[in-house]
Image (cartoon, grey):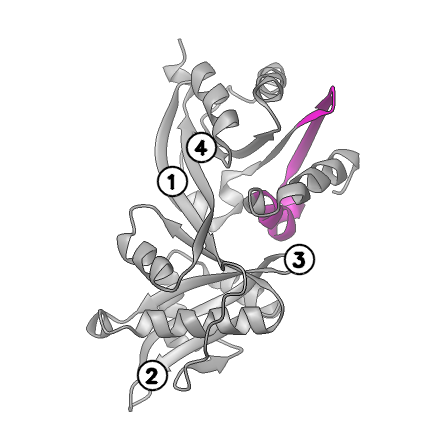
Amino acid sequence: MVNSDWQKAQAYFHTDRLKYLVHLKYMHLYGDSITCSYLEQDHQVAALLRYPSARVVWDAAAYPTTEQVFLPAASDASMAGLLLDVMRQEGLFEHSQVIKFSDMETEAVFQQALPLQFVRSLTSYTNPPNAQFEYDPQVVIELQPNDEHMAAFISNGYSAEEIAADFAKGAVLFSLYDDEHNLLSSCMIYQNFDNLWEVAGVHTADSARRKGYARRVVQTALAHVLEAGRIPRYHVEDVNRASHELARGLGLKPCLHFKHYVYQPNLSS
């Protein structure tokens, strides 16, 4: 439900849309399940988004023993500390939770106060100014996935329901096929929020890897996003060296470093 805290938090996140793109994405895609809190003091602010871990398929699979996912943000360390105090007062640390950080200052304040277990870090890339990408003439642009696409998406951790929802809202597919129309490589684009669209679900058949197919479908997806006047996002888990090489090889630049931690109350002193 949109309320005053929601509107103020959203306005704050829009002051740096790339830094807070995950917050804005989740407000756009999962707003029906998000609780939003907002604090303001001496012209400094803090905000917290939280939702049940089971609400998002990826979180449910990665963090099955946690209750909620927290996305805190603060304009300085003092506000991060104030937000932490409010969360404690509200009893939000009585159960195992996931905490995701987009800025090092807020992360440092929470790390000093809580027994956090680091789980993973991810990097988002976008295009540098005046970047241009060419369409590959052999990449097929499609508006609905077939069975091969669905199998590829599910192997990447998506659910059939998620994919259906994304394509109902205008997602687009980019695919390379062999002469027998077997799927070699594909990816999709879908809206995160406003005019920011994510290049996601990159998948290449085992027999077709290391042949440059993923680069070709991603390059065409980027060309499509930019031609429409939108901002692309390419999101990579930091252990995925091949995807980082692909992003850098295409000339993309990092725009966000995002870290996941798990909090477990039984580890508190």
Q: Residues within 10 Å of mark 1 (few under 14, many from 20)?
A: some
Magenta residues? 23-45
Q: Amino acid at mark 4?
A: Thr
Q: Amino acid at mark 1?
A: Ser
Q: Earlier in the sequence, mark 3 or mark 4?
A: 4
Residue 226 picture location, percent across and down: 56, 69
Disc 2 designates what residue? 177
- Horizontal side, residue 62 vs residue 222: left or right: left
Q: Residues within 10 Å of mark 2 (few under 14, many from 20)?
A: some
Residue depicted at 36% across the width and 26% down the height? 117
Question: For residue 84, what is the image quadrant?
Answer: top right
**Residue farthest toward the bottom in the current orientation of the protein:** 179
Disc 1 designates what residue? 121
Residue depicted at 49% across the width and 60% down the height? 127
Q: CA distance from mark 1 to mark 4?
A: 18 Å
Residue 145 picture location, percent across and down: 46, 75
Q: CA distance from mark 2 to mark 3?
A: 32 Å
Q: Nearer the viewer, residue 79 or 143?
A: 79
Q: Earlier in the sequence, mark 1 or mark 4?
A: 4
Q: Which mark is residue 105?
A: none
The quadrant of the rendering that contains the N terminus is: top right
SS for dot 1:
strand
Q: CA distance from mark 1 to mark 3?
A: 25 Å
Asked if the magenta segment contains residue 161, the reply would be no
Question: For residue 79, what is the image quadrant?
Answer: top right
- Horizontal side, residue 36 vs residue 256: left or right: right
Residue depicted at 36% across the width and 68% down the height? 151
The nearer-to-camera label among 2 and 3 is: 3
Given contact means CB atoms under 8 Å apart, are the residues at marks 1 and 3 in contact? Answer: no
Q: Earlier in the sequence, mark 2 or mark 4?
A: 4
Q: Amino acid at mark 3?
A: Asp
Q: CA distance from mark 2 to mark 1?
A: 33 Å
